Image: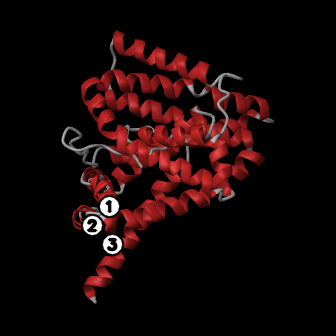
Amino acid sequence: MAGNNMISKESLIIFLKGLFMGVADIIPGISGGTIALITGIYERLVHSISKIDFKFVAYLLKGDFGEAKENISKIDFKLFIPLVSGIGLAMLFMSNIIHFLLKNATALTYAFFFGLIVASAVLLYKKEHFMSFKNILFSITGFIFAFLFTGAGALQIGHSLPVLFISGALAICAMILPGISGAFILLLLNQYEHMLFVLKNLQFLEIFTFCFGGFAGILCFSRVLDYALRKYEAAIMSFLIGLMLGVLRLPYQNIVSTMDSFLPVLISAMLGFFIVFVPEKKFRKPAKTPDMSKQAPVDT
């Protein structure tokens, strides 16, 4: 009985951590992985994902259920079930709130996102210290790319199922990069508001397609990105910092076109900045960063 209570308590704690991660994942500029690091679950999550052997799918297709069962038994379901449940519930709940805010307080909401993204870029720069001529060039390249990519009429890729599949794969790849949120990538791809609408209205075909894209992204690209980060970390992170600053064009355009008063917009932006900057600064020192050379990183 005591053991069951302990398991229930542990599951509840993991579920609550999943809720916080889900809230972070749906807001551009806040990284769910950062929340995982702060709440002390990051290393276990990274280790558990790295231990997943997707060969069980092949075993099932071959009818070798013994080998499949052995592979499946190694998956940390005690972590994944409550964590994913918490993340999913938070994202469904927050999608309704953010969709409402984008519709009824557009300027203030995008100003909040603006502050979040600026704070994330600043923290990423302070953490990495990649100040060299070559890395500045990578940052400028990232800025120009994102600035043009998010320009008016520059992105007309629609919201078809193949686009949602690719968006899911790219978003999950962003989540395994330090300091980058999947919602930020969706904002860059002009899929953010659409996915909020999809979640709000429980359009299961679109949700399944997006999630399947995310699964494919983890399966195909996580180790590739891990290798690239270890080999070309400075260049990649410099490019990402520029990307984050360049994408600010999108919230800026929405702020300017819907703003009634400057002061509330400024306050909202400052609130977004400090919500990311202050807690991250507080928790950065005590948090123990896992050895990324030995484990495949992930940002949920």
Q: Which residue is mark 3?
A: 10
Q: Residue at x 67, y 44 (%)?
A: 194
Q: Nearer the viewer, residue 10 or 293?
A: 293
Residue type indicated by callout 1: Leu
Q: Residue at x 30, y 30 (%)?
A: 229
Give coordinates of residue 77: x percent, y percent.
Answer: 33, 66
Give coordinates of residue 177: x percent, y percent.
Answer: 38, 37
Q: Mark 2 to mark 1: distance in Å? A: 6 Å
* First reached walking from the N terminus: tag 2 or tag 1: 1
Residue type indicated by callout 2: Phe
Which-is-in-front pick, marks 2 and 3? Answer: 2
Q: Mark 3 to mark 1: distance in Å? A: 31 Å
- Which element carries disc 3, helix, strand or loop? helix
Give coordinates of residue 278: x percent, y percent.
Answer: 45, 44
Asked whether, in this view, residue 76 is left or right of residue 291, the answer is right
- Which element carries disc 2, helix, strand or loop? helix
Q: Quadrant of the N terminus?
A: bottom left
Tags 2 and 3 touching, CB below 8 Å: no
Q: Which residue is mark 1?
A: 60
Q: Is residue 19 visible?
A: no
Q: Is residue 282 visible?
A: yes
